[in-house]
Amino acid sequence: GPESYVDQRNDLLIEERTAIARQASQALGDVQTIMIGSGSTTLHAARQIALDFNNITVIVHSIGAATALATNPTINALVAPGIFHAGEGAMHGVQTIEFLNRFNAEWCILGASGIAPDGPTDALIEGAEVYTAMIQRSRCCMILADTLKFNRVLLAQYAKWSDVDALVVDQLP
């Protein structure tokens, strides 16, 4: 498919994704509640947040992000239930969205399979639905993307650029 499995993507662009994660973490300021989407760049962000923050609540649907956050015992990680997508390592579906709709966050941090002129896109319809719910439940939205994602338009657009407060990239295309 257009996006390889998350475990395979985790081994790519490590330096770039680490730099993106550092920028993203710094941009959060004095945050108390965050929602984090699935994917390899957001996994790097979860690892950085676990290093940089204490006594916050983070809501995730990704097993990898939950595991990364668990390295910091002061972080309250809430893991959404749902149908497990093995390739993405994350939950999706009605149960996931209903769970997310019970919470509010200051920021959501999302990845993108593609950065299109109209907005960020994802290869998975199920992932895009979860991302849309996270955006609706968050005051601010941050998209993380490496330059390889630019000018890629994938199946599911999950936001318009007017919904996005910050785009964090390793370098401009």
Image (cartoon, helix red, strand yellow):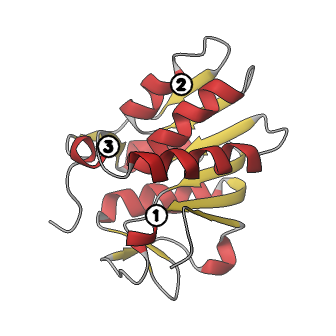
Q: Which percent across, then down, holds residue 47?
A: 53, 31
Q: Amino acid at mark 1?
A: Asp
Q: Which percent across, then down, holds residue 162?
A: 68, 79
Q: Quadrant of residue 168?
A: bottom right
Q: Would residue 38 be seen by someone viewing this image from the given angle?
A: no
Q: CA distance from mark 3 to mark 2?
A: 16 Å
Front in this rendered view, residue 137 or 41: 41
Q: Earlier in the sequence, mark 2 or mark 1?
A: 2
Q: Amino acid at mark 3?
A: Asn
Q: Which residue is mark 1?
A: 146
Q: Which residue is mark 2?
A: 69
Q: Residue at x 31, y 50 (%)?
A: 12
Q: CA distance from mark 3 to mark 1?
A: 13 Å
Please, which residue is most extreme toward the front here? 15
Q: Secondary structure at mark 2?
A: helix
Q: Residues within 10 Å of mark 2 (few under 14, many from 20)?
A: many
Q: Amino acid at mark 2?
A: Leu
- Asked whether the beta carbons under mark 3 and mark 2 sit within 8 Å of each other, the answer is no
Q: Which mark is residue 82?
A: none
Q: Which percent across, then down, holds residue 169?
A: 56, 64
Whether residue 1 is situated above or below residue 115 in the rendered picture: above
Please, which residue is most extreme toward the top here? 73
Please, which residue is most extreme toward the left here? 1
Please, which residue is most extreme toward the bottom here? 117
Q: Which mark is residue 10?
A: 3
Q: Residue at x 28, y 49 (%)?
A: 9
